[in-house]
Amino acid sequence: MDKKHILDVATAWTKEPFDTDTISKTKLLIDSGSDEYLESFYKNLEFGTGGMRGIMGVGTNRINKYTLGKNTQGLSSYLKKSFPDEQVKVAIAYDCRHNSKELAITVAEVFSANGILAYIFPELRPTPLLSYTVKRKGCHAGIVLTASHNPPEYNGYKVYWQDGGQLVPPQDQEVLDTIENTQFADINFDKNEDLIQYLDESDDQAFIDDSVKAGKIAGDVDRSKVKIVFTSLHGTSITLVPDTLKAAGYTDVHIVQEQAVPNGDFPTVASPNPEEPEALALAVQLANKINADIVIGTDPDCDRLGIAVRDNDGTMKLLNGNQTMIAMTALLLEKTDLESLTNPFIGSTIVSTPMMHALAEGNGIECKEGLTGFKWIAKMIVDHPDQDFIGGGEESFGYMVGDFVRDKDAVTATLLACELIAFAKANNTTAYKYLLELYVKYGCYQERLVSLVKKGISGAQEIKQMMIDLRQNPPTKIAGKKVTIIEDYQNSKRTNKDLSTTETMDIPKANVLIFYLEDGSKIAARPSGTEPKIKFYMSVKEELDSVDEYETVQKNLNAKLAGILKSLDIN
């Protein structure tokens, strides 16, 4: 770490063009000589798979009006260069986090100062509504201020393109290069009020109508018999999900009131992450009290959902993201007239369950696979206009129904999950049994994710070294099973150890390694693009002859997963 360089960078923040408050806070940080000071200035905050996320505060490695202003100034320059003869338009949304509204207004002001028309929601709104609005309003780009499920001290900045999907190549690097060449002194904060327009309830209603059109697929079933517990986890979904369920005919909806008020401190949970069982604890308690059929919780910006359903013993069972994705995709395929579509396909990611491929093959359609992040699923739709997209998801609890939104969408996915319950009830079964029957038909897959948190400068170096070690000295066996195939997405190489062959993979580069074992198991290693973590994704499989044998097979699969964890020493 070059401390002189850090001091030079920080010292620049004690002068114009920075405001007096920023200058004062920067001087205090420099004087402290603390880790916080070093962390704040040792690098520029980076874009990851989900845009830019970081801790709020002063500094180049923090979320503040200047780092986001620089992003917006750079993006403004890129947009004006890309669309020189058009009135450039953008849409802006924000979530429940501290400073989100103020930062969103700053972003709108910078766009307007650059002659760009900025549509902005007057209050917090879900991320999928931003994606939808970019398309509906014919915008050239969109911004949402959110840090998803990160801790309260975080915020973030996600960029969307004309199609409603997040930035992908080549625009992503071109935008980043433009931002990199933008100086803080270049930021134009001199707003033009005539170019800032606030959106209204008609924009919400249009989304609700299209969400019901896309997600209400179960047919003539009695939706009033589905008892739903819903929690917004203090986030934005409270603004749209209840109204969407009502519009679709669900009348027995019970909201977890303790978590219904938006609050960037997320006071009732350790983490507002629907992937974690603790986040849905209050909802499950309410479900048990009123004997509900399903629990649904969404993350703060309402692009991901976690669900729990009744298992064979009537106990509320939390499903993981892969299970939710499989059950919802299967229902979509079952209720869609596939023959009326043109080369239909579903979408998934390289770290999600391989069962999506089995499901697609069983229905005679294609499953396209992309890198981690929904921008790659959105890109599939853009890249294949001659094919019809049905739906798709990823293991991290995201799902997209159809292509009216081009990002993961917990509003429509919540409706689809309820449709699954309604469909099962109408057919004298349960959503849980529906999932188990899919395991019998396509094979019983089980996945597990282990995330190792490595914070700060030393943590980033440790994660980097772990990936270097795995590349330079890849395991030949894992849990006693031979490694047969290694996929290195950073080098675009797929090596078959049995055949001693290597081929080039036609997929964008990413820092991901995937190992396939002789028994069909799959292990992926990937540093997170938005959090200080390295993630290991594991998938194992066995045949399941009948639903009655599920618990036995599940124990076998858990033992396999435990063996993989022990072998890799990542417990």
Image (tube, rainbow, N blue to C red):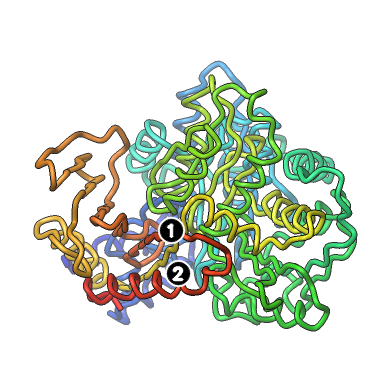
Q: Residue 28 in the image: state x and y as whole percent.
A: 38, 77
Residue 109 lies, with reference to residue 505, above or below; the image says: below
Residue tagged by mark 2? 553
Q: Residue 450 in the image: state x and y as whole percent.
A: 37, 70
Q: Are marks 1 and 2 in contact (CB under 8 Å)?
A: yes
Q: Amino acid at mark 2?
A: Val
Q: Residue furthest top?
A: 85
Give the Cα separation between the discs numbered 1 and 2. Answer: 8 Å
- Quadrant where the image shows the N terminus: bottom left
Residue 302 lies, with reference to residue 191, above or below; the image says: below
Q: Amino acid at mark 1?
A: Glu
Query: What residue do we see at 58% from left, 71% from top?
Result: 272
> First in sequence: mark 1 or mark 2?
1
Task: Pick the residue in front: 381 or 200.
Answer: 381
Q: Is residue 107 left or right of residue 69?
A: right
Q: Residue 219 in the image: state x and y as whole percent.
A: 82, 43
Task: Pick the residue in front: 319 or 240.
Answer: 319
Is residue 101 visible in this depiction of the protein?
no
| Location of residue 7 (image quadrant) | bottom left
Q: Is residue 162 left or right of residue 58?
A: right
| Location of residue 55 (image quadrant) | bottom left
Q: Residue 318 in the image: state x and y as whole percent.
A: 60, 71
Task: Pick the residue in front: 440 or 34.
Answer: 440
Residue 143 lies, with reference to residue 417, above or below; the image says: above
Label for residue 543?
1
Query: What residue do we see at 55% from left, 62% from top?
Result: 546
